[in-house]
Amino acid sequence: MESYQIIILLFALIALFAATLSFILHFLHRLNTTASRMEEGDQDLVFPRTSLPVLSKASAHYSLLSKALGDLQRMEKFQQKMMSFEKKEMAYLLERENLSRQLEKQLRETRTANEMVSNLNRDLEGTNESLNEAINRLSALNQISRMMGMEHDKKQIYRMAVSLPAELLQAEIGHLLLLDKQRGELVLEYSQGIPESMSGGRHSVPLGKGLAGWVAQNRKPLLVKDFGQQDAFSPVSRMGYQRRTAICVPIMIKEELMGVICLINRRSGDPFSEEERTLLATIASETAMAIHNALLLEKIQRSYFAMVQSLIVAVESKDVYTRGHSERVTQYSLLIGEQMGMSMEQLEIIQQAAVLHDIGKITVELSILNKPTSLEVEEYEKIKDHPMIGFRILEPIDFDERIKIAVLQHHERPDGKGYPHGTMGSEILFESRILSVADAFDAMTTRRPYREPMSIAEALREMDQNLGTQFDPDVVEIFRKVIGIMTGSGMTAMLQ
């Protein structure tokens, strides 16, 4: 019995052990399952509990251990995330740094490009300014050339040769000097910007002396940028003014020296430049051609005038009664003009018009000019044609237009009853009104084939009777003074 009980007890112990072991294993399995699920992230689970102290403690420790392991895993994951974030942040920072370096490089390149563009713009502005200045100067040069080419009066050419480039280059003072070959010196023909106290009298410069003399002798342009930086030329001119900067260029036609143009002192105070010296030299070339043409034209005019004077002599030789008529009319006209205070230019016009006023009579038959009786209507009409014929003879010649008009109008009357056109009043050129008085007076006081000469008193009374109709009252009044002067000074022989 005891063996049997021992076996049963043994089996009971084995069964109890097995049940206990099974319970423990099952409990451990639940612990493990709960821990695994907690590791997977299920944080709401609770570890199983038991009344067995050992297992309860084991469960609690296991719970703490599982939580610790979970926390550790979460920390590791967090660290991994942080490391990943740090890597990304580092990569982002590196990318930003690279981007910043690239931006800085691009900024430097942009600044460099902007500086280059700015420099290019300045260069372009400078180039455009230079081009505009060159265009303006070429335009001005073309205008000067055109104006000089159209001008035939040498005095006007002298004036333009100085005033136009002086205005273009903003010069304070300008001179034009022409070569006097006989004296071997330069003579001042025109100047501007010189005080009147310095400009009076005749000014000449020997060849080789001073700026103009040096240019004339060497036949090449001269630029003095600063008189204070050289000792070859005095800063004080021969006329007494102070010189700071100057350009002088020769006026040449082919290889022949005609004169010199000088510009002195810039209004701005800046020195003249090489380009401006070249520009003035070009203007001097145009001036040389214009002066040459004007002198040539003047020579032609003198030749033509001499020829016409010969024709006048021929006309007067046909009519013994009018011999010397043009000379006397010229003298009367000039005396009237002088008493009226006319300029030299106006007196020259009156002189030439008076000499030429009867040139049209070259076509009138001698029988009409010397007819001892009154003229027939047809004959008088031929006589009335001579002003128009004279005008046509002079028309192709480059005389002053006033000379031609004075010849055309010297038989016109203020009342419009003159010939050839019946011009009246103020429409008649003043020089023509002077010629009309001088011509009529000489005609009345000289012998004609059909009548005896009038006395001076009779001629003046005849003029008084026709004031405002045939003669200009102001001109007749001055002419009376002229006759009084001539009579008082013993010039009566001219009045015979």
Image: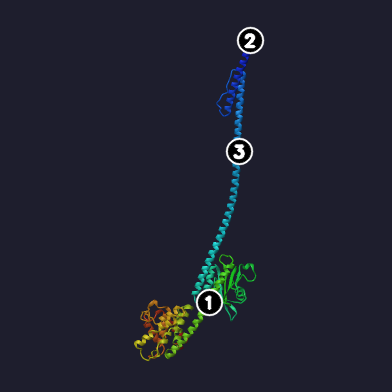
Q: Which residue is mark 2?
A: 4
Please state, as top left, top right, bottom left or bottom right, where the N terminus lies in the image.
top right
- Asked whether the residues under the numbered discs 1 and 3 touch, taking CB atoms below 8 Å apart as contact, a structural biologist would say no
Give me the disc on residue 86.
Answer: 3
Q: Which of pointers 3 and 2 indicates the residue nearer the eye? A: 2
In percent of the image, x 59 and y 78: which residue is there? 185
Quadrant of res 7:
top right
| 92 relative to 43, above or below | below
Compare marks 3 and 2 and give the one earlier in the sequence.
Answer: 2
Give me the disc on residue 291.
Answer: 1
Q: As rendered, which of 7 and 354 lies closer to the eye? A: 7
Q: Amino acid at mark 3?
A: Glu
Q: Which of pointers 1 and 2 indicates the residue nearer the eye? A: 2
Whether residue 112 is visible, yes or no, is: yes
Q: Amino acid at mark 1?
A: Ile
Compare marks 1 and 3 and give the one earlier in the sequence.
Answer: 3
Compare marks 1 and 2 and give the one earlier in the sequence.
Answer: 2
Instruction: Categorize mark 1 by other alpha carbons within 10 Å: few (<14), some (14-19), many (20+).
Output: many
SS for tag 3? helix
Q: As rendered, which of 148 and 341 lies closer to the eye? A: 148
